[in-house]
Image (cartoon, grey):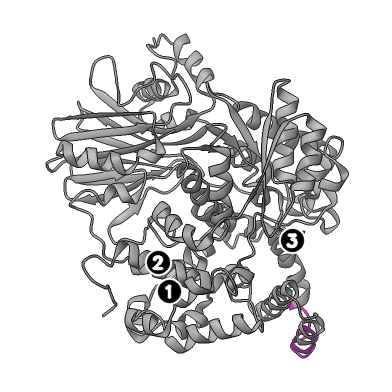
Amino acid sequence: MCGIAGIVGGAPAKPVLEAMLAALEHRGPDDRGLRVGDGVALGMTRLSIIDLVTGRQPMVSDDGAATIVFNGEIYNYRAIRAELEAGGARFRTQSDTEVILRAWEIDGARCVNRLRGMFAFAIWDARRRQLLLARDRLGKKPLYYWHRGDTLVFASEIKALLCHPGPGRAVDWPALHHYLAYGYTPTARSAFAGIMKLPPGHTAVLDGVTLTARRYWAVPGGVSVAACPEPSEVAQRVRAEIREAVRLRLVGDVPLGVFLSGGVDSSVVVASMREVTSGRITTFSIGFGEATPSYDERPYARQVAERFGTEHHEEILEPKAAELAPVIVRSFDEPFADTSAIATFAVAAATARYVKVALSGMGGDETFAGYPRYLGVRLSETWARLPAWVRRPAGAAAAGMVRESEGSRNLRDWIERFAAGAEQPLPERYLAWTRFFDAPAVVALATPALAAHLAGDDPDQARRAAWGGRGWDDPVDGAFRIDLAAYLPDDLLVMADRMSMASSLELRAPFCDHRVIETSLMIPPAVKTPRLRLKGLLKAAYADVLPPAVLSHRKQGFMVPLARWLRTDLRPLLDDLLSPEQVRARGLFGVDQVERLKREHAAGHRSHADRLWALMMAELWVREYLDRGGRWRLG
């Protein structure tokens, strides 16, 4: 696992590349390498996992014509190596980096089709004067770039790009619009104008002044219920695919562990590990100092650890969110509003004290139907067919029957959103449920100056394209595809990478293996959720090995008590970042709307925790990255 950076064209000075690498040291504290010359500079910082002795980078081909820098892990590199050796290739190292380089010498950019893993890499071809950039299918590893004329600068994180004099700090307004809608920036853009992301499943070739991107993998098509095998056969296949994905992710020359939350997904990972190894398994679980049953799954994690004989570690963490918030912003380099980042940062920091690699159950919800909103899509189709004169009073009555409490306020909010969404067609209905600020809320929130920048932009366009309008047998299939195309790569995998690498920890996610996802999408949603049971198929596949309590307890998620914190521990930070004077001076959001959100949340009338946190993180980002030499303001 590494941080990579490079400059092609212009005048790539060595001090600039060294500064870029220094900004990426947390991604690879074990080693650093660079190669500068002939108008090209390539460098990397290394977290040594595979081939600790001879796997140094940048790595150069035998004839000196090609140079590679690579971030990630290729889990099937030994199989690829054997294939290449059978064809006459010879290797100098035991590293997966050299396997990519040799595969490129034979296949060119198509070498990515051989690779099973997480990766972002760059290969400079000195003969053709071409640069190849590549990123894995799901986007587990990041790759940002800035391109002007014959100059291209790339890096694993934005902070490294900002060390180069080319990229500036102007705001990318469509990306900010997307952030207000969903809490993170979109697939191909960043919060900085001109700094782009190579999308997941893409390669790009720089030839002179032309950068040409090509998609090599996309989420595959679905299947009808009629074409699906028997559920027992499907369950066996699912278990076999997950077992293989886990087995491949045990590769490495350093100790590894598992994030064991106590939920189904991480428990499945541990069960699969025990099926393929009789050796030591180290598991890690956390709880919060103010833990309540709503936020603490450690009792379930203990049952799993006992069942599979793991070396289990538990820690009670009391993350000081007010202190962590600026650290999180600096880790992402962009505004990022998923509060799970706080818990992920904390557990990664704790785990990194013991191991350099950890497996995670991330991706299980998107691949095997773990979110209640998937059932909501199916239920909403029935609800939408009711006459409006029945729906509206029924929705209001259901919300009014919910008792007043912290959890019930969230439930009441969800009921109101569900009922309102039924007035819209799919996929608009699903998009409305997943947004932080829907379109009318953005209009109400934005000042006239901000509204002018956002005019004409549609942050939902890519999600509508992912839904596809193909007339799936089950509309839940469209919801899966939206999450696999946007939420998983742009939110969860970004969070996993940044929060783990902030502690120099490599995180591996078997459920995000592209073959596991392809298998999942060949299974109709109704088969994944038999009798409207979330993850019913996955639970059935592991019913013979997982503790019954783990299989039956309600999904809790990797959450923090943000709503409560904003009324207590985080209240001073909230009042600082979103004071009327600060909001007015910044010029982005209407003071009255922000004050309304604060007032309603403080009084407990409605929970606006996610929306307030999104605005707070936006203000923190502006302070960290735009307030340079004075207070930045719009207009």
**Marks 2 and 3 in Cβ contact (< 8 Å):** no
Q: Provide the secondary structure element on which disc 1 rests.
A: helix
Indicate the position of residue 251 as horizontal and vertical percent values.
Answer: 56, 24
Where 589 falls versus 104 (above or below)? Answer: below
Observer-nearest of 445 and 341: 341
Q: What are the residue bounds of the magenta stretch?
A: 384-395
Judged left or right of residue 625, residue 250 is right
User: Sequence order check: which comes first, mark 1 or mark 3?
Assistant: 3
User: Sequence order check: which comes first, mark 2 or mark 1?
Assistant: 1
Q: Which residue is mark 1?
A: 577
Q: Which residue is mark 3?
A: 294
The type of residue carrying mark 3 is: Ser
Indicate the position of residue 262 as horizontal and vertical percent values.
Answer: 74, 46
Distance between mark 2 and mark 1 Cα atoms: 7 Å
Q: Please tell me whether residue 387 belongs to the stretch shown in magenta.
A: yes
The type of residue carrying mark 2 is: Leu
Q: Which residue is mark 2?
A: 620
